[in-house]
Image (cartoon, rainbow, N blue to C red):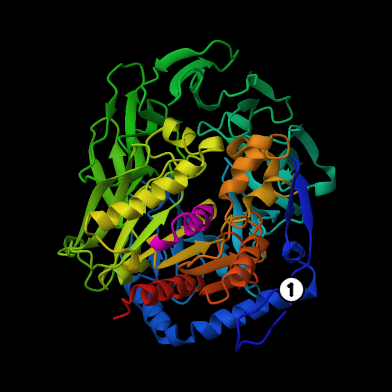
Amino acid sequence: MNTETTAAPVAKRVPSERTHHGDTVLDEYAWLAAKDDPETIAYLNAENAWTERRTAGLAALRETLFNETKSRTQETDLSVPTRKNGYWYYTRTVEGQQYGIHCRRAVADGETEPPTPADGAPLDGEEILLDGNALAEGHDFFALGTFDVSPDERWLAYSTDFDGDERFTLRVKDLQTGEVLGDEVPDTFYGSAWSADGSILFYLTVDEAWRPHRVWRHTVGTPATADEIVYEESDERFWVGVGLTRSEKFIVIDAHSKITSEVRVIPSANPTGVPAVVAPRRQGVEYSIEHHGHRFLILHNDNAEDFALAYTSADAPGDWVPMIEHSPGTRLESVDAFANHIVVSLRTGGLTGIRVLPDGSTGSYDIDFPEPLYSVGLDSNPEYQTNTIRFHYSSLITPDSVYDYDLVTRQRVLRKRKPVLGDFDPAGYEQHRDWALADDGTRVPVSLVCKVGTPRDGSAPCVLYGYGSYEASMDPWFSIPRLSLLDRGVIFAIAHVRGGGELGRRWYETGKFLAKKNTFTDFVAAARHLVKAGWTTPSRLVARGGSAGGLLMGAVANLAPDAFAGIVAQVPFVDPLNSILDPSLPLTVTEWEEWGNPLDDPEVYAYMKSYSPYENVAAVDYPAILAVTSLNDTRVLYHEPAKWIARLRATVPDGDFLLKTEMGAGHGGPSGRYDSWKEEAFVAAWILARLDAQG
């Protein structure tokens, strides 16, 4: 291996054969999967040094972009306090500090409005529950997994990760004394639930493949060795979750695969009870529950592709009684129950929405929103006995906004809009919804934002973003760092490709399994459309995506290398066939219901091999490619982009291929906000250089 920074690293080739369904494949870079091998680390360090050398000329631009984000951000700030029982809960940030400070303050007599100081200063009488900066001291990475206050407001369960591998250590803090108890539990997962009296905490652990499969019961003040397993899921396709209903009446244990669900409940007043099944699992039927008075609300897809809402008895769950019938094209996504209202989050026509059902009434209504493109969803709403909900709203030109909405009067109050400092004016930008035509005639939505007056003569630079997996929707969102691109004349576009959920469950179904290539061809169609419509040209177009969106980037690099001037692939899933063939890896078995099972099905094997970016690297004129990954990523292992870049460079020696590995982070990259801004500035500077739009 060449480790000199004066030349691109050249990874050694070690013959490693793989044979499935009569097909033998040589994987000469499989050795890079050995994370503990010093030679692997040396190679990644050499790639980092080469990337730093190749981008050294962008250092001043990176610093400028970082400072632009910093100068536009109100660094000392405070979230809109959320009321729960007798406290206001909120998070503060302080200028110069990387992480949030989690706080609460007692509700004053007669106080009904949340206190919101404009300068982000601490509230009078503030109690600091957790200071992320203090917890992170001495660590390069820090993340919270669980943050859960008990119903009696005495105990705080919280968990920390200092490596980025999403394996958390769980602790309990006494909020009366400030003492962190000695009952520490290592290697836990996200999620927890308290008993009604706060004496028992439920939590999750994972198996060797990083699958949350066990729910445990922990008695506060006792050692973890005394904890009991409440539920264990043996089917490797299923993940397990745990939580407490808003009513605080039930602990909910949710077992779910990609296409099947099963829910169990335990009365929170009887936390040592045996979990009761709400409805036995049936292959292909997904459902979730919410407690509402005498009943469980059931959101389900039983003979309802875009989901329907029903209810069953909470005392003796049985038949499901319809409440909202299935309506094709209107995807019901979640249900929230309050004492006198039910609120359904949905999407229709490619946009998100909120529907209100007053209890005991047929007079449901949808909340209206003003812009043609936007994203809306419920915010923190911990109280059950309330007639007011909080939701967040944003668009490509409207900063993140928090509203309180009166479910009776239908009046909304803007509690906070994220400050954007400097001369930002939303009127200086415009957003559009275009439609690209896919090869099979399908219309693919494309959302765009740009400066007012951006020419439509093909001269403008453009970034096209995409994802397209897991029914995840890339709804329009606001970004302060993005302003640095827009103000340099760059158009930002989102291709809402199949495999996502923007247009309902069918949009997802026609972009997975043996229809996965629709995701890739939709993205190429979007890129071609932007050129045809005069927004940009291929020489001024950069594609960007991460994780499963990184698979998309790798696939379109092979499919249409002429369509782009550059490609950014972040934590990219570019070696999917090798990963999905190995059931010992994290996520693999659960992913078979997303991608198919190439171990058992030769058709799936051949199909995945035909689009896998790593398998299809060819001697063609690729655009410049920047791959960004993290050594401790548990979701997409670092060696996928490392192998991909190695093969690209070996196949096309004069290509422009860079690999940047965060050596102490996970799937989300750097954890601190300033570190994240620096990472984004690095990527944005590379993009601007590819687009010749640095000024």
Q: Residue at x 35, y 16 (%)?
A: 360
Question: Residue 240: percent from the left, percent from the top?
Answer: 66, 37
Q: Secondary structure at mark 1?
A: loop
- Seen at 39% across and 17% down, the residue is 325
Q: Which quadrant holds residue 12?
A: bottom right
Magenta residue check for 558: yes
Q: Nearer the viewer, residue 246 or 672?
A: 672
Left or right: 598 as drawn, with respect to 419? right
Q: Quadrant of the N terminus?
A: bottom right
Of residues 224 and 536, the one nearer the viewer is 536
| Amino acid type assigned to the residue bearing label 1 in the image | Lys
Residue 616 in sight here: yes
Residue, disc 1 = 12
Q: Is residue 423 above or below residue 314?
A: below
Q: Position of residue 625 (x, y in %)?
A: 49, 68
State how many labels appear.
1
**Left or right placement of residue 60 versus residue 166 in this view:** left
Quadrant of the rendering where the C terminus is positioned:
bottom left
Q: Find the residue positioned furthest to the bottom.
A: 6
Q: Residues within 10 Å of mark 1 (few under 14, many from 20)?
A: some
Query: Which stretch appears magenta?
Result: 551-562
Which of 649/280 is in front?
649
Against 507, residue 460 (above or below) is below
Main SS, magenta region, reads helix
Residue 257 occupies quadrant: top right
| 106 or 669, nearer to the observer | 669
